[in-house]
Image: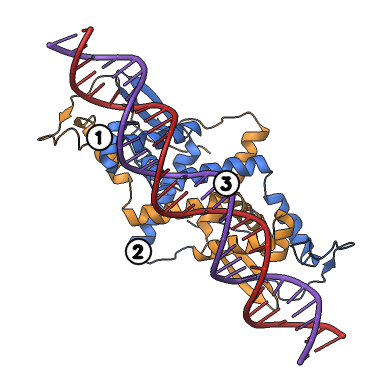
Chain colours: A orange, B blue, C red, D purple
Amino acid sequence: MTAKTTQATRETTPIPRVRKTAAPSPAVRDTCEIDYVDEVRVQRARQGVPDADAVATLAETFKMLGDPTRLRIVAALAAPDVGELCVCDLATLLDASASAVSHSLRALRHLRLVQFRRQGKIAYYRLDDAHVTQVIREGVRHVNAARSGHESASRAG
Amino acid sequence: MTAKTTQATRETTPIPRVRKTAAPSPAVRDTCEIDYVDEVRVQRARQGVPDADAVATLAETFKMLGDPTRLRIVAALAAPDVGELCVCDLATLLDASASAVSHSLRALRHLRLVQFRRQGKIAYYRLDDAHVTQVIREGVRHVNAARSGHESASRAG
DNA sequence: CGTTCACTTGAACAGTCGTTCATACGTCAA
DNA sequence: TTGACGTATGAACGACTGTTCAAGTGAACG
């Protein structure tokens, strides 16, 4: 994947540690004694962490893809030239019950990851998020590559 | 994100449905009566779904990122020029207990998403998967963009 | 040594999750 | 209208998850 990671090099020299200002009673605290082992990097790291709401949203999306059934549904819909599939076909090709598929689709719909239309009795579902589509496609490609070829082609970040 | 999605156009004309060959007793089956509503697309979809092991691996990775604490840890380590952080600093900047952070890091380590080195008492953790690093960075960027700017800039897949 | 500190780990608990089962809804054909 | 069918949904159940708490490990230091 050639992720251009601009990370700091390994620090071997000990960093001057910053002590906490007026440390609270040791029984209450569950973090360590030192305020920051490396204050500069903590500052940088802090900027990389979004606020609570954004983290919750992002985590929900990942969690949605963390279930095998939902992941397979999304992968099926993300396949080239598939576009849309009905609940029946999804249940058939995933070898799952229509109920389980419907429940999964409901969850995916709730997060706006899929979209659906009705045509008579049949409900056709399709993906509704380009980012997720891209992530899934790359993820599938990555996992397949890691299994067919030799393993780790992308260690380190 | 401009995900170039090559999906089939919406099908408006009804598709000749393929009936199941010798349908089993209706009480046993939980899928629908029809074998395939759209056999061609099901074939394509099937190719997009990896085998069970690959799906499990991919799902585990997503599930790992689906927890807010672990996601924040990874996001912190994925920030530019951070490289590595110790458990103490992570606990401090995430406002979490050292125990919770250690447990989360253990899980991330188990999936080889992070790597660590020891220097005396301190354990320094860094990301160990370039794909995950990239996905996290793009995810953070996406969520931030969706929150600051107008909302859905990337509907449809 | 013995203490302190950063970190790890196991147990335990409350909360969440995904499935199945039964049922209900709306559509279509007869 | 009646029945069949595709889908949706709520309840319920077992399984899992992430946290806290308490205890433990090994390194540094006096």
- Between B147 and B3, the residue placed more toward the observer is B147
> Which chain letter goes with mark 3?
A
**Residue B30 x/y as whole percent:** 74, 62
Residue A147, image x and y in percent? 65, 34
Mark 3 crowd level (few <14, some 14–19, many ≥20, 10 Å Cα)? some
Instruction: Give how far apart the Cα atoms at labels 2 and 3 are.
Output: 26 Å
- Write down the chain letter for disc 2: B
Image location (x, y in percent) of residue C28: 77, 82
Numbered tag placed on residue A31 in the rendering: 1
Residue A31 visible in the picture: yes
Left or right: where does residue B111 sit relative to residue B30? Answer: left
Q: Amino acid at mark 2?
A: Gly
| Marks 2/3 same chain | no
Marks 2,1: beta carbons within 8 A: no
Judged by depth in the image, the label closer to the viewer, 1 or 3, is 1
Question: Is disc 1 placed on a helix, strand or loop?
Answer: loop
Tell which circle, 1 or 3, labels the residue nearer the N-terminal end. Answer: 1
**Tag 1, which chain?**
A
- Would you name the residue on which mark 2 appears? B149
Q: Which residue is mark 3?
A: A138
Q: Residue A15 vs residue B83: left or right?
A: left
Badge 1 amino acid: Thr
Q: Secondary structure at mark 3?
A: helix
Residue B3 on image: x %, y %? 53, 56
Q: Residue at x 54, y 61 (%)?
A: A108
Comparing D26 with A85, the one in front is: D26
For marks 2 and 1, give the CA distance.
Answer: 36 Å
At label 3, the amino acid type is Glu
Crowdedness near tag 2: few (<14), some (14–19) or many (≥20) residues, C-alpha within 10 Å: few
**Mark 1 and mark 3: Cα distance apart in space:** 38 Å
Please give the name of the residue rendered at 34% of the width and 57% of the height, measured from the top-left corner.
Answer: A53
